[in-house]
């Protein structure tokens, strides 16, 4: 796993789960992070958790870099879905979400695995993260809204607190 937070939004993601690859690519694009992630094939549950864990650990340092804001918030749509995410780097990990997709499946993946992935990101980076689904009924759009929004919020959190004089 490699993440360049000052990138162009390029992603080379191979988790073995095509839906997850798509969602992580969206995150990279919306954050303008360059992400390289490869997960050894195996059990889908473990692949998803490993991807989240690797992403969280890779972001831990940039979120706490000298001058980094360390917090971010965003609202981004994907068709009829609208998600809000607020996050902050801290000493404790906490994920609070009103999104319940446990009965849904998408691309052969149980969507509650997305909650597992987010928990691993939060734990790996030691974040407090609030995920709110404001609107949305189509599972694919809901997930896309969440990952786009997460990308924007993470980008804000990794940015410097103040602009440098030109």
Image (cartoon, grey):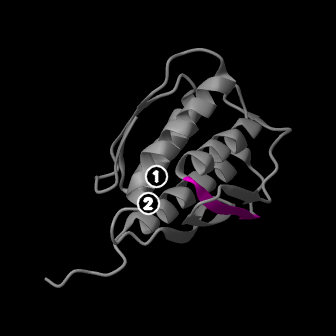
Residue 86 spot, x, y in % from top left:
61, 68
Q: Do tag 2 and tag 1 residues touch (Cβ < 8 Å)?
A: yes
Q: Residue at x 72, y 64 (%)?
A: 132
Quadrant showing the N terminus: top left
User: As displayed, is residue 28 above or below residue 83?
Assistant: above
Q: In this rendered view, identify the residue nearer to me: 57 or 151.
A: 57
Residue for badge 1: 60
Residue nearest the observer in this picture, 94 or 19 = 94
Q: Which residues are magenta?
A: 126-134
Q: Is residue 70 above or below residue 94?
A: below
| Residue sticking out furthest to the top | 42
Which residue occupies 66% across, 29% down?
Answer: 107
SS label for mark 2: helix
Q: Give the left or right position of residue 64, taking residue 41 as reference.
A: left
154 lies left or right of 110: left
The C terminus - image quarter:
bottom left
> Tag 1's secondary structure?
helix
Residue under label 2, please give it: 63
């Amino acid at each position: 796993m490699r993440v360049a937070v000052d990138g162009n939004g390029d992603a080379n993601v191979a988790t073995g789960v095509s839906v997850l690859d798509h969602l992580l690519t969206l995150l990279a694009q919306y954050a303008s992070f360059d992400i390289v992630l490869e997960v050894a094939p195996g059990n889908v549950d473990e692949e998803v958790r490993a991807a989240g864990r690797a992403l969280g650990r890779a972001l831990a340092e940039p979120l706490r870099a000298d001058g980094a804001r360390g917090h971010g918030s965003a609202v981004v749509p994907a068709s009829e879905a609208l998600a809000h995410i607020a996050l902050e780097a801290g000493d404790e990990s906490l994920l609070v979400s009103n999104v319940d997709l446990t009965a849904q499946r998408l691309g052969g993946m149980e969507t509650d695995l997305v909650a597992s992935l987010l928990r691993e990101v939060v734990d790996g980076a030691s974040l407090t993260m609030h995920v709110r689904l404001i609107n949305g009924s189509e599972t694919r759009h809901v997930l896309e809204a969440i990952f786009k929004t997460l990308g924007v919020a993470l980008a804000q959190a990794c940015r410097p607190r103040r602009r440098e004089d030109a």
